[in-house]
Every structure is written in C-alpha cells, then in structure tokens.
C-alpha cells in the first residue's frame, strides 16, 4: 500500500472505538496472521500528517518506509497517559514459536520535520524508537527529527540493527528527563547500531547519552 500526502494535503489520524490511533505503515497484525511479507510506503511531500496515537513504520514481518520532504510535517501526538512511543521504526514479533522480522526506514529530506515532542516526561517506553527489536534505517538529510524530552533509542533490543545518519545540515533534537530509565540518546544497548553525523549536521540538546 502507498500513502501520499502532497502540498496542502492534511491527514488526521484519530482514535477508534477502542482508543487506538496508530498510523501504521507496513506493519503486521499482533496475532501472527498477515505477517508474511508485503510492504507499506508513505510519502509526505509538502503536506501534513497528525497522528494522535503515534507512528509505526515496518514491523511484524512487513517492510515499511516513510519519506518526509519538501517542508512536509508529521506530528505524532499520543496521549501522555498511554505512555506509548510516538515513533517506532523497525520492530519484530515473536508468536507461536515463530519470529516475524520487521524492517522500517524513515527519511527526512529538504526541510521535512518529524515531531515526536508532544509527550511530556513519561516512562522508558515513551522514547522515539529506531529498531527497538527489528531492523531500521533513519536518515535526516536537511530536515529535523524532534524526539522531545523522552529521548531516542537506536538498536535497543537483542538482535536489533539500526543505522542513523544525520547529514547535509540535518538535526536530531533530543532531550532527557530526570528518570534514570531514560537517556537523551541511547545507542546499541543490546543491538548493533551505526550513527553518522556529517555535513554541518547536529545532534542537539542531549541530557544523557548511553553508547
């Protein structure tokens, strides 16, 4: 499936009758069915997406990708009371003895913005997650990823793999709270990760870092 939001277009993702509101791009079901390949693509080119329950890209046996470009904006605004992550890129599901590997990619180009700063200081599960359990590729190329006060984790879990590239004036803005469970930036706590910052780019406002 492919989702395209162009200049002037606005997509608002609200809650359903169960209170869920995730925007899922290439992510399988939680019961093991529908997790056997396939992909989802989202392109936000000058438009705006506002998701009230977070954004999940690639997981549970599927591949997902999101590109934000030409001043496009994606706002992830899950309710603080849920403690849900506002961003998950690349996750894996294990069910019935079977592992469904997921791969996700996020690319932020040419003035694009992913804003995951809405959740106030919460818990260790609220940070932006790049490959919490799966495989993920994140590139900030002349754009902005605002991870907010809960920080960002890169290759958090066992067997996870991630690359994070900040280039051509791109910025990763991330903080940390007073909780000992959180870091402004956590890289490869249990997985494998590569982080590259080049071309006048910056990782800014780090409170604590675990590398």
Image (cartoon, rainbow, N blue to C red):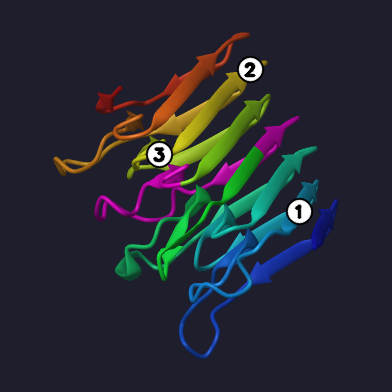
| Residue 91 screen position, x and y as percent | 49, 52
Closer to the camera, 104 or 183?
A: 104
Is tag 1's residue or tag 3's residue first in the polypeptide sequence? 1
Image position of 87 (left or right of 174): right
Is tag 3's residue or tag 2's residue first in the polypeptide sequence? 3
Q: CA distance from mark 3 to mark 2?
A: 31 Å
Residue positioned 53% across, 14% down in the render: 197
Q: CA distance from mark 1 to mark 3?
A: 24 Å
Could you say which disc has been placed on residue 41 in the image? 1
Packing grade of label 1 (10 A; few <14, some 14-19, many >=20) is: many
**Quadrant of the image containing the N terminus:** bottom right
Q: Do callouts 3 and 2 mark residues in contact (Cβ within 8 Å)? A: no
Give the residues drawn in magenta, as a range: 107-133
Is residue 46 highlighted in magenta? no
Determine whether the residue tagged by mark 2 lies in a helix, strand or loop: loop
Is tag 2's residue or tag 1's residue first in the polypeptide sequence? 1
| Residue 105 screen position, x and y as percent | 63, 41
Image position of 203 (left or right of 67): left
Packing grade of label 2 (10 A; few <14, some 14-19, many >=20) is: some
**Quadrant of the image containing the C terminus:** top left
Q: Residue furthest bottom?
A: 17
Could you say which disc has been placed on residue 159 in the image? 3
Residue positioned 75% across, 53% down in the render: 42
Q: Main secondary structure of the magenta part?
A: loop
Which numbered mark, 3 or 2, is in the foreground of this view?
3
Q: Which residue is mark 2?
A: 169
| Residue 27 screen position, x and y as percent | 60, 62
* Res 207 → quadrant: top left
């Amino acid at each position: 499936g492919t989702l395209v939001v162009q200049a002037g277009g606005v997509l608002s993702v609200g809650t359903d009758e169960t209170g869920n509101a995730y925007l899922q791009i290439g992510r399988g079901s939680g019961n093991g069915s529908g997790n056997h390949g396939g992909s989802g693509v989202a392109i936000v080119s000058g438009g705006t997406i506002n998701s009230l329950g977070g954004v999940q890209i690639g997981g549970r046996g599927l591949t997902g990708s999101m590109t934000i470009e030409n001043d496009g904006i994606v706002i992830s605004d899950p309710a603080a009371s849920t403690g849900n992550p506002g961003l998950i890129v690349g996750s894996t599901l294990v069910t019935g003895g079977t592992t469904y590997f997921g791969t996700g990619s996020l690319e932020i180009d040419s003035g694009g913005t992913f804003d995951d700063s809405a959740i106030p200081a919460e818990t260790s599960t609220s940070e932006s997650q790049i490959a919490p359990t799966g495989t993920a590729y994140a590139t900030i190329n002349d754009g902005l990823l605002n991870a907010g006060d809960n920080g960002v984790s890169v290759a958090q879990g066992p067997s996870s793999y991630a690359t994070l590239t900040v280039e051509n004036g791109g910025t990763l803005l991330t903080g940390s709270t007073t909780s000992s469970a959180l870091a402004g930036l956590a890289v490869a706590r249990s997985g494998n990760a590569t982080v590259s910052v080049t071309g006048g780019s910056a990782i800014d406002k780090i409170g604590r870092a675990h590398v």
